[in-house]
Amino acid sequence: MAYEPFSILESTAVPLPIENVDTDQIIPARFLKATERIGFGENLFRDWRYHLNNVPKKDFVLNNPIYDGKVLVGGKNFGSGSSREHAAWAIYDYGFRCVVSSFFADIFKNNAMNIGILPVVVSPKFLSDIFTAIESNSRTKLKIDLPKQNITIIDTNKSEHFDINPYKKNNLLNGFDDIDFLVAKREEIVNFAFDRPF
C-alpha cells in the first residue's frame, strides 16, 4: 500500500484563489534534489510563504493560523508548467489529501492521484461558492465523498458531482499506486500467463 486509502474526507480547507498556479510555484526547482517523497512539505509554495531571509510572509494563506485542513482550494488551471512529480509530493507531504479547482493540468492531476491526493474538478460557480463560504467562515468544512463522487459545502449543503477515471478511483480507494495495483493482480497475471503456451 503506497498511501492511506481515500474514501470520505470531511475537513476544513485552505483557500488559494490564484489562477495558473504552476509547479515551480508549488515547489521551486532548487528543492528538487531528493528522490524520496519526504521533506518537500516544508518548502511548499516556498517563495510565496517566506521572505529571502526565511521569515514567514504574514499575508500568505499558509501562514495564516485561521486556515488549516486537509483540503487545498485553488484557482483555475492548478498545477500547470513542468511535469515534476515533486509538486504533488510537496502537497501530500504538507498534509493535504485533496485539491479542488475548476481545472487541473493533466500531468499534475495524474501525479497527484498516483500518490494519494484526490484532485476534484468543480464548476467555476461551485468553486466560487466554496471560496465565498470559506471567506465567511474559515472553519467551513467540505465533505469529499469519493465512492459517490460528490463534494459538499457542509455549512450551506450545496453539492456537486465530480468525475474521475474509474481505474484511478479504485486505486485511491485501496491506497494503490500503479505498482501496487499490478502486485494486487499478481495471481490473475500468473494464471493468465500459465494458461497460454509460449
Image (cartoon, helix red, strand yellow):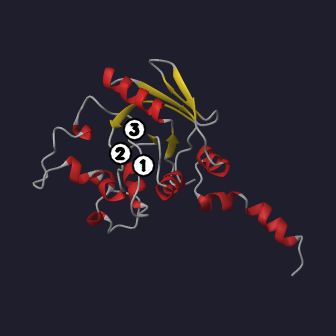
To which residue does mark 3 refer? 73
28 shown above or below 120: below
Cα distance, mark 2 to mark 3? 11 Å
Tags 1 and 2 touching, CB below 8 Å: yes
Point out the frontmost of discs 3 and 1. Answer: 1
Which image quadrant for residue 29?
Answer: bottom left
- The kind of secondary structure element at disc 2 is loop
Give the percent coordinates (x, y) of residue 171: 62, 50
- Tell me which residue sits at (22%, 40%) in the image: 60
> Disc 3 to disc 1, how far (Cα)?
12 Å
> Where is 156 relative to 174, above or below?
above
Disc 2 to disc 3: CB gap under 8 Å: no
Which one is in front, 189 or 111? 111
Q: Which mark is residue 19?
A: 2
How many numbered marks appear? 3
Residue 77: which numbered mark, if any?
Answer: 1
Residue beneath the point at 40% across and 64% down: 82
Judged from this view, the residue extending furthest toward the top is 156
Q: Earlier in the sequence, mark 2 or mark 3?
A: 2
**43 or 19, which lies in front?**
19
Q: Secondary structure at mark 3?
A: strand
Residue type pointed to by label 3: Val
